[in-house]
């Protein structure tokens, strides 16, 4: 796993073994950031269920002004901090060791993020909890792009019940990205 583009291009990133993480492949990460690239320069980026931090680090490398990484596993938080230090991007990053819903509460009152990426464990209903928290939060406004990674076969017809509308869906072999906006 590596940084694809930007100031930290080609630098390898550490990944945590055995925490049931699913590191995003370089190919999927490149496709995702080709879609997001117009919004990246100068943006505020929130990486929920951050794992190794690869997605948020990619955003920072490509010019995001700030990234907040949310991860509840201690070892994964350590990995994120090591990756941020190695890529020399730590000065524009915050790492919160907590669950995603608690992080949304903790960040309450801050300005809206431009991009919120979430890759929760599949089929546990965590994405519904996060969208419910974001619906009533200042962290997502009508300009925020919310990207939800799910397994390819997950039912996501419920997203509109939480005040978000899909505006793009990108399918891959085993998973997909739903691009949501406040609707």
Image (cartoon, rainbow, N blue to C red):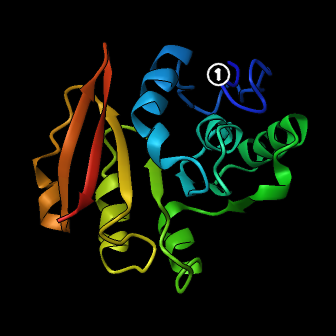
Q: Quadrant of residue 135?
A: bottom left
Seen in the picture, residue 7 relative to 116 is either above or below; the reply is: above
* Element assignment for label 1: loop
Residue 52: x and y, percent?
Answer: 68, 36
* Residue 119 seen by the camera: no
Residue 100: x and y, percent?
Answer: 51, 61
Q: Residues within 10 Å of mark 1 (few under 14, many from 20)?
A: many
In the picture, the quarter occupied by the N terminus is top right
* Residue 23 seen by the camera: yes
Residue 18: x and y, percent?
Answer: 66, 26
- Nearest the viewer among 45 and 98 is 45
Q: Quadrant of residue 163?
A: bottom left
User: Image check: 147 left or right of 88?
Assistant: left
Seen in the picture, residue 44 relative to 88 is either above or below; the reply is: below
Residue at (70, 20) in percent of width and height = 2
Residue at (88, 41) in percent of width and height = 88
User: Image check: 46 left or right of 125?
Assistant: right
According to the picture, the residue beneath numbered tag 1 turns out to be: 4
In the picture, the quarter occupied by the C terminus is bottom left
Q: Quadrant of residue 16?
A: top right
Residue at (56, 81) in percent of width and height = 110
Residue at (77, 33) in percent of width and height = 7
- Nearest the viewer among 6 and 176 is 6
- Nearest the viewer among 63 and 146 is 63
- Number of marks in the image? 1
| Farthest bottom residue in view | 109
User: Image check: 139 left or right of 77?
Assistant: left
Residue 8: x and y, percent?
Answer: 78, 30
């Amino acid at each position: 796993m590596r940084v694809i583009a930007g100031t930290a291009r080609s630098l390898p990133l550490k990944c945590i073994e055995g925490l049931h993480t699913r590191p995003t492949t370089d190919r999927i990460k490149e496709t995702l950031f080709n879609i997001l690239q117009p919004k990246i320069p100068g943006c505020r980026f929130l990486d929920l269920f951050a794992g190794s931090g690869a997605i948020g680090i990619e955003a920072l490398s490509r010019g995001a002004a700030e990234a907040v990484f949310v991860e509840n596993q201690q070892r994964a938080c350590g990995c994120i901090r090591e990756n941020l230090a190695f890529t020399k991007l730590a000065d524009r990053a915050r790492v919160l060791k907590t669950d995603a819903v608690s992080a949304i509460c903790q960040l309450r009152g801050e300005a809206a993020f431009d991009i919120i990426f979430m890759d929760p464990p599949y089929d546990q209903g965590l994405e519904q909890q996060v969208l419910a928290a974001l619906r009533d939060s200042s962290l997502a406004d009508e300009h925020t792009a919310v990207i939800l990674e799910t397994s390819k076969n997950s039912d996501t017809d419920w997203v509109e019940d939480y005040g978000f509308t899909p505006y793009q869906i990108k399918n891959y072999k085993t998973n997909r990205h739903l691009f949501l906006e406040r609707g």
